Amino acid sequence: MAWRDSRTGRGKLLLFSFSIVLGVAALTAIGSLRRNLQDAIEQQAKSLLGADLVINSRDAFTPEQELWLQGLGGQQSREVSFASMLYLPRTGSTRLVQVRALGGGFPFYGGMEADPPAAANFRRSGGALVEDSLLRQYQATAGDELKIGKLTTRIAGALRKVPGETIAMSAIAPRVYISLEDLPKTGLLQEASLARYRTYFKFDAGVDVPKLITRIQPELKKFRFSASTVEERKRELGRSLENLYGFLNLAGFVALLLGGVGVASAIFVHVKQKLGTVAILRCLGASISQTFWVYLAQGIALGLIGTMLGAGLGVAIQGALPRVLADFIPFDYQFHVMWLPVARAALTGFVICFLFALLPLLSVRRVSPLAVLRSSVESESKRRDPWRWATGACLGLCVFGFAMTQSQNRWVGLWFAIGVGVAFAALAITAKLLIWTTRWCVPHQFPYTVRQGIANLNRPNNRTLLVLLALGLGTFQMTTMYLVQHSLLREFIVGTGPRQPNAVLFDIQGAQLQQVTKIVQSEHLPILDETPLISMRLSSVKGNAVDQILGNTNRTRGHTWAYRREYRSTYSDHLRDGEKIVAGKWIPQVTNAAESIPISLEQGIARDLHVGLGDELGFDVQGVPISTRIASLREVEWRRIQPNFFVVFPRGVLESAPAMHVIVTHVASADQSARLQREVIQEFPNVSAIDLTLVVQSIDSILRKIAFVIRFLAMFTVATGVLVMITALLTSRYQRLQECVLLRALGASRGQILRILGIEYCCLGLLAGLTGTLLATLAAWALARFVFHTGFTPAAAGILVPLLSVPALTLITGFLISRGALKQPPLSMLRSE
Amino acid sequence: MYGRTVNSSAILEARDLTKSYPTVNGPLVVLHEVSFALRPGSTCAIVGPSGSGKSTLIGLCAGMDLPTTGEVSLDGASLGALDEDGRARIRCEKVGFVFQIFQLIPTLTALENVMVPLELRGQRNAQPQAEVLLGKVGLGDRLTHYPAQLSGGEQQRVALARAFIHSPKILFADEPTGNLDADTGRMIIETLFALNQEAGTALVLVTHDNELAKRAQQIIRLKGGRIVDGN
C-alpha cells in the first residue's frame, strides 16, 4: 500500500530525501579521513619525529652537557635554529627567515622532500635548502646566490617537506637549512642571540626510549632541557587530529540537522496532502497502526534513500578532503574507503532523518474518518501527544550525544549542543517575530503588490520559518567565520599614519646602535622607539631556587615555561604606550643598585609565577646575579606593534649589561622597506628586520587557509540550506501556482504577479540574510571576546555580502520554481480539480 | 449556424470560435465555429451536456484563453489582438467571474479576497467597498475568515462579492450552484440576478438547470462543441 500510495509523489519523496544527502556525505567523508589519518600515524609514527628522541635547549650546550649527551649513545644529529635575515643579491630581496644549521644524519626516519631531490643532500654537496614558498615569492631558483649573515652560499634547491612539520606555520618564518659546518661562517650567533639547540637521537632496536626518559629526567631538569619522543609526538598529533576531526564532524552535523528540519517540513506537507487518503482508508476499515505504517514506511524509505545517496556522495568526495586539509596535516597518507565510518555516518544520518520524519508522521494516527465528509474537520486532536514529546526528546538526546562523542572536551560538546539549539531557536523566534511584524506593521499606503508580497510571508501554509532556518543557518556559519577572521586580522593591522610603527630592526648590538640609527635617519625615517634588550633567566622566586621549584611539579602547577624561559627585559624611566600600572608603584630610577631592585612585572606572568607585590625574584643576568622585588604590576597591550616586556627594570641598574637593541620606525612603502633592510643588512648582517606588513600578510594567509577549511564544511550547510529552501518552495508550489493563475484570471498583469513573487522572495531572502548576519555578528563578537580575547571589529563586506547575496539567491531560486505560474493560461483554473 | 449576425452595440461578440487541443490521435476539437452576441445588461444561459464545451466557451469569452480560430470582441475590444497583459487588463476592468468551485485564494481572508480586483487596479478605497458588499451577501460577520473556515455556500457568496466589487460590465458564472445544496443555490442565483438588475451587468451563465436557464433572456444550447439552439 505504501508503494502504491507513493505512486504520484515518488519524485517529490526522492527530492525530500536530498535534504539529508549532503549532511551524510560530510560525515562519511570526515569519518573516512579520520580512520585514514589514524592508520597513517600508526604506520609513520617514527617519521613524524624523524628520530627516536629529541633533546631541546635554549642555550648552547656546555662541555658538561656535550659529554652527557654523548654518553646517551645512539646515532646523533645536531641542529641550531634561529631567526635571521636572508639576502638574495640577484633580486636584491631581504626576508626574515628561520635558519636551521643541521649536522649529522637527521632525519633518521622518513626524509626531507626537496626539488631537485638531490638538494636534500645539502650537508654533503653544500648550499642551502630554502623553503619553496619563499623561492616562489622572490622568484629565486636553485643555483642563485644567497647571504645569511657573513655566509655567502648558493641555493641548493626548494624545501618541500620536513618530517612532522606542517606547511601552514612556515608562512611566517620560512625555513632555510644550511650545514652545521657553515654556521660559524655566518658570524650570527653572539652571546645574547636567541637560538634553539637540538640533538636528535637514533637508538638501536633494543633501547626502550620511555624508560630512558625516566632515567635521565633529573639531568633534563638540571640542564633545563626538554625532550620529545615518538610516543609523545603520536599522542600530541593524535590529540590535535582528534580535535580537528571533532570540529569538522560537528560542522558536518549542522548540515545534517538542517537537512533533518527540511525532511520534517517536507513530510509535514506530504502528510497534509495525504490526509484525505488517510481518512478514506480509515473509513474503509484500516486501523490507526495500518494507516500509520503506510506513511512510516514511506518515511523510512526516504531516509534510506537519502542515507545511501549521502554515503555514496561522501565516498566520492572524500578524495577532495586531503587536498583541503593538505597544509594542516604534517605527513603523507593514502586514502582508502573505510567502510566502518561510512556505515557509522549512514546510521547517524538515518536515525536523524527518521526522527525528524517521525515528528510530522505521528499526526497520521490522529486523522478522523470524518475528514472524508468534511475536509475542514480538525484532523488532529488538540491533546498533547506523548509520542511527539518522546520523539522530540530522542532527537535532543541524539544531538547532545553526538556532540559529546565528537568533542574531546565535554564542555565543548555541551556548548555545541546548546549553541545549535540557540541558533535554531533564535532563527525560529526571529522568523516568528518577523511574521508577526509583517502581519501588523505593513502600511495600507503601500501598493497592493507590495502588501500582497509581504503578506504572503504570514499567510497560512507559508514557508517563512523553514526558509529562514534553511538560509539563515548557512549564512550564520559562513558569516561568523568571515567576521572572526576579520576581527583576528584587525588585531595585527599595521597603522598607516606616518607616526605608526610598521618596521622593526632588532638584534642590534650596543656598538652598532649609533650607526644603525644613522642609516635609518639617512633614509629620512623616524626613530619611533629605541629599546635595549637584556637577556636573563629567573634564578629564584620568593627565595626558592628555580631548579628546586621545577623539581616540585605541585608548585609549578604546569607553568614550567614561566620558570624556564629566557627573559628579554629592558630598563626604562617611563611607562610605554599601551602599558598601565594595575597594582603597586612605578619606580623610574634607582640610585643604589646594591639593594633589592624594584621591578615592574606584567600581570599575566605574575599569575603564572604565583607572585605578587613585594615578592622577591632573583635573576641571572648573563652570569651576574641580581636580586629584585616586585614594586608594580602592569597590564600590557600585547597586540600593539612594539617591543613589549614581562619585566621592566628602573634606570640605574642594567645600563652596563650586554644588551641588544631594537629600533622601531615607519616605512612609507615596500620599496623603502626593502632599501632600509638591504642597507642595514649589508653593513650589519647580524641585525634582523621585520616588515610588519609582510607579517600581517603571512597571518592573513594562515587565517585564510583555516577559514577555507571551515568554509568548505560550511558550504555543506549552505548547499543543504538551498536544497531545503527548494524543497520548501516546491511544497508550496501548487498553492502558489493556484494563487497566481487565479490572480491572472481576476485581471492581474504579468508584472503584478512578478512583483508580488519578487517582493515575497526578496523579503524571505533579506530576512534570512539579516537574521543569519545578526546571529553571526553576535557569535563572532562572543568568540572574539571570550575565546580569542580580542576586540571585535565588524566588517562591512562580511555584513553586506550576505545581505545582498542571500536575497538574490532566494529570488533566483523562487522565480525558477514559480516560472510555470506565468505560463499557465487562466482557463486551466476552470478545469482544475 | 446560429447567432451569426453581428451586433455593433453588443457587449460580447463571439465570431466563429473554434478551439482544439493537440492529442496523440490528432487535434481534439472542443468548440466548432461558435458565434453569438450579447447586449449590454442582458442575461444569457449556456446549457448543454457534460463535455459539450460550455466551460471552454465561457473561458474564451472572458479572455482567459485564445481560440484556435475565430474572434472574441468584448466591449468593443478584440481579445485576439491583445497580449496576455492586455487581456488581463480587460478582465480586471470589465469582467467578473464566478467559478463552480469558488476559486477563492486560500491564503487570503474573505475580505481580502473581495478586495483583490480593486487592489489590482490600484484603487485605495477597496476595504470599505468590500465590507459593504460582503454585508450585502450576508457575510458581514465573516470578514476575517479564511476560505477553509467557510461553508461552500459562504465561499460562493464571497466569490459573488468579488465578482461584483469592481462593477464589471459583464459577469460570467460557470455553474455557480453546481457544488451547492438547492436552498443555497437558489439564494446565490437570486443574488446574481439582483446584482445584474441593480448594476446593469450583463450575465452569462453556464448551467445544467433548464428552469434556471429559462430565467435568462437568451439561451445557447451546445452539443458536441456546436450551438444547436441559439434562441
Image: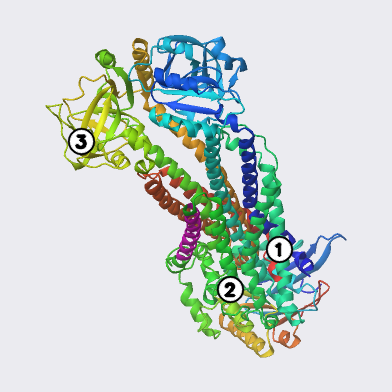
In the image, residue A774 lies at what x, y percent?
Answer: 43, 53
The amino acid at mark 1 is: Ile
Chain under callout 1: A
Inter-mark Cα distance, 1 to 2: 54 Å
Q: Is residue A124 magenta?
A: no
Inter-mark Cα distance, 1 to 3: 73 Å
Magenta extent: A412-434
**Residue labelled with disc 2:** B168
Q: Answer with mark 1 or mark 3, whichever residue precedes in sequence.
A: 1
In the image, residue A235 lies at what x, y percent?
Answer: 54, 39
Circle nearer the viewer, 1 or 2: 1
Residue A530 seen from this side: no
Residue B71 vertical placement versus B10 (above, below) = above
Residue at 70% x, 39% y is A336
Chain under callout 2: B
Residue A611 seen from this side: yes
Residue A601 vertical placement versus B125 (above, below) = above
